[in-house]
Image (cartoon, grey):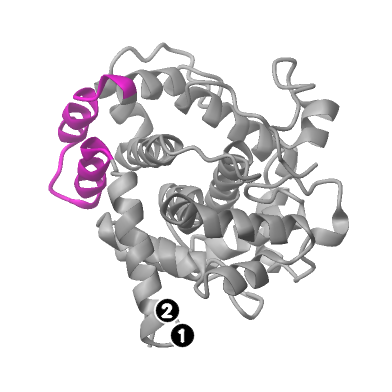
Amino acid sequence: MNTLEPAGGTDRRNRVRLIVERASELTPLRAVAMRAIQLAEDERAAAMDLATVVSSDPALTAKLLRLSNSAYYGYARRIATVREAVILLGMRTVRSVAIASGVIDAFNAQQRKDGFNRDLFWAHSVVVGLVAEAVARDTKAARPEDAFTAGVIHDIGKLAMQVAEPAPFARMVRLIEGGTPYDEAEQEIFGVSHAHVGARLAERWHFPESLVEAIRLHDPVTPITRIESLADVVASANLACNREGLAGGFDWVNDPARHPSEPLAAQVGVALGRVHGGMRTLEEKGRAFLKHVSTQAPRWYQARADDEGPPEMAGEQPNEGEVA
């Protein structure tokens, strides 16, 4: 039976509960994002209901229209209103933008200087979402829009741990920078996994159960050989990105020894093979997404930015304390 309880008894369960409670207080999800989730899951809701909710938030409206009119979607006609965006893009796509924007804004309001780079964290998360979207579309194992959403939020437990317990998190980052694998450092410092924390936080935010499960199971103990569920899609997309060195919060692209070597399900390679340009195309698409839903262009993985990034991204330097 699936359970959200971490192994190890009451102490670990209490640690998860305290982290989630503290993170919820510090990073409240905007009401418009919460309402967008509910409406997109309600079969009785009309497109105009979602448009009305999104239009009530000027900041989200501006981001949605910027993204809708960018090369990210590539529509020939200009989209001038949220109503048009919902009609052309679909309710679930608009929901994905609302959730991603809401979660990014919530956590970015609580910045920390501890060597963990938020730009690279969101870069990883969004590219995982785009890989998951491609895999879901090809395998039919989940709805592509749901796969994108789940991919973007799969690691929110890490940020919850960072904002709720900054000193222990900083110690964990130092261990990781020194060569300790992330999961080992996490267990040594916290005794609980970010997957369990993230799943609990998603429950607190009333996310659909399928998204909660995808967060909880995104780091499976055994390799996934066949993709059959949303959780399989997200776990496989996460592994695909980590194998490329697109590590959430760190720039490990130049250190292949730190890339995981677990085998990918063959379906992932097939799905990425159908994307013109493969992983690099999805990286650029992820960069474009973040540029339009954030207030500034995100810093990307340094080697990729220097080698092939667009002019405005190339040559940016790592933040102070960031892994090179």
Near mark 2 (Cα within 10 A), the count class, few <14, some 14-19 or many ≥20, is some
Q: Position of residue 288 (x, y in %)?
A: 58, 27
Residue 209 quadrant: bottom left
The three-letter amino acid code for the residue at tag 2 is Arg
Quadrant location, the N terminus: bottom left
| In the image, residue 66 above or below residue 30 | above
Question: Is 32 included in the stretch rendered in magenta?
Answer: yes
Element at label 2: helix
Residue 179 quadrant: bottom right
Q: Which residue is mark 1?
A: 7
Q: Position of residue 121 (x, y in %)?
A: 59, 44
Q: Position of residue 284 (x, y in %)?
A: 67, 32
The three-letter amino acid code for the residue at tag 1 is Ala
Near mark 1 (Cα within 10 A), the count class, few <14, some 14-19 or many ≥20, is few
- Residue 21 can be seen in this image: yes
Q: Position of residue 321 (x, y in %)?
A: 71, 40
The residue drawn where x is 78% and y is 49% is 252
Q: Tell me, for residue 224, which label it has, or none.
A: none
The residue drawn where x is 61% and y is 73% is 188
Element at label 1: loop
| In the image, residue 260 above or below residue 95 | below
- 300 to the left or right of 19: right
- Residue 84 can be seen in this image: no
Q: CA distance from mark 2 to mark 1?
A: 7 Å
Q: Which mark is first along the chain, 1 or 2?
A: 1
Tag 2 near tag 1, CB within 8 Å:
yes
Q: In the image, which residues are magenta?
A: 30-59
User: Which residue occupies the foreground of this view, 205 or 52?
Assistant: 205
Q: Which residue is mark 2?
A: 12
- 223 to the left or right of 7: right
Quadrant location, the C terminus: top right
Q: Main secondary structure of the magenta part?
A: helix
